[in-house]
Image (cartoon, rainbow, N blue to C red):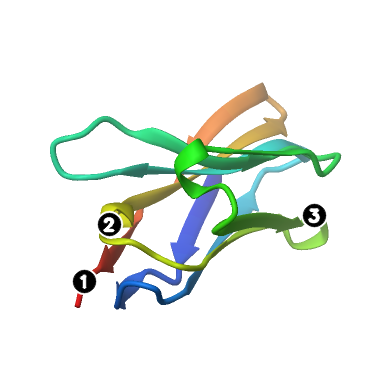
Amino acid sequence: QVQLVESGGGLVQPGGSLRLSCAASGSIFSINAMGWYRQAPGKQRELVAVIISGGSTNYADSVKGRFTISRDNAKNTVYLQMNSLKPEDTAVYYCHAEVLNPEGYMDYWGKGTLVTVSS
């Protein structure tokens, strides 16, 4: 089994910054893609940013230029630096990983961390 544990959410004022972290542990041979998704109240879960093992990244248009995704392969950890936060960034942020383990490639999700942007 694989566990993803997120941290770093909280309450921040508009224009502020937060850094999310997500550490993967368990039965892991390697991790292909790691990413962040978010779900706001009443809305569907959406991709925020993803980074693959080679370092290529992809961002939602709404966060380009404000958010930066990075990963530490040695620690099986992915980060999301969020700057210039807006109220519309308020959501539960979920970590995702595509993990190669003895069962093959499988998708795993964290439990989510709440980010609230409000004055």
Q: CA distance from mark 2 to mark 3?
A: 28 Å
Measured as percent of width and height from the top left, residue 81 is found at 57, 65
Q: CA distance from mark 2 to mark 1?
A: 8 Å
Q: Residues within 10 Å of mark 2 (few under 14, many from 20)?
A: many
Left or right: 90, with 63 as reference point: left
Amino acid type, residue under disc 3 in the picture: Asn
Quadrant for the C terminus in the image = bottom left
Instruction: Give me the residue at 23% from left, 45% from top.
Output: 40
- Can residue 111 be seen? no
Instruction: Give me the residue at 71% from left, 43% from top.
Output: 28
To which residue does mark 1 refer?
118
Using the rendered view, name the quadrant where residue 33 is placed.
top right
Amino acid type, residue under disc 2 in the picture: Thr
- Can residue 75 be seen? yes
Measured as percent of width and height from the top left, residue 46 is found at 39, 33
Measured as percent of width and height from the top left, residue 106 is found at 59, 26
Question: What residue occupies the far left of the structure in this picture?
Answer: 42
Q: Residues within 10 Å of mark 1 (few under 14, many from 20)?
A: some
